[in-house]
Image: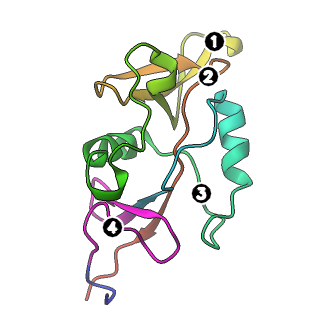
Amino acid sequence: MSDGDLPEIGDVMEDGSVFAGLSADEAERLYVMPEDADDTMKWNEANEYADKQDFGGRNDWRLPTAKELSAIFDAKSVESLHGTFHTASYDHLYASYWSSDKVVIDDDKEKTGALTMNFNNGAEGWNYTWSYGSVRLVRTEPVLKP
């Protein structure tokens, strides 16, 4: 694949990551880990987990933005991504994935949250950062134009 060629959504890359599409402005390629973290985590724990990852020889893994979560949700049923996300309708937190986007609930620092997306139904929302959510890490790289 030359720099200008794009893989298909759901293609597994040489490093084991999965291509999940382009950023909203089509300036970056979005890659996801092939599986979720082993367990749900608090938001801060999820960020610490991301900082420690060295998957496929890469250490630039992070939580996705809310927009990236939306793109991943759209791709969740394609090829190698199919069936790899938590979608249990009986457990909201299990199906809700953390984004990197924080929100302030009010001026009380203990009431900060982060945007989430429920992969059972695509509902966007937020959760307190001290609560638990599922984690699927991403990384991006620029789209090189021919």
| Viewer-nearest of discs 4 and 1 | 4
Foreground tag (1 vs 3): 3
Residue at image mark 1: 111
Secondary structure of the residue carrying tag 1 is helix
Residue at 45% x, 69% y: name it.
141
Q: Secondary structure at mark 2?
A: loop
18 versus 113 height, above or below = below
Identify the magenta region: 6-29
Q: Residues within 10 Å of mark 3 (few under 14, many from 20)?
A: many
Choose mark 4 or mark 2, whichever is in front: 4
Q: Three-letter amino acid code at disc 4?
A: Asp
Q: Amino acid at mark 3?
A: Trp
How would you rate the neighbour count of disc 2 (Cα within 10 Å): few for under 14, some for 14-19, many for 20 or more?
many
Q: Please, what is the three-letter code of the amino acid marked with disc 1?
A: Lys
Q: Which residue matches tag 4?
A: 11
Residue 132 badge: 2
**Quadrant in the rendering for residue 5:** bottom left
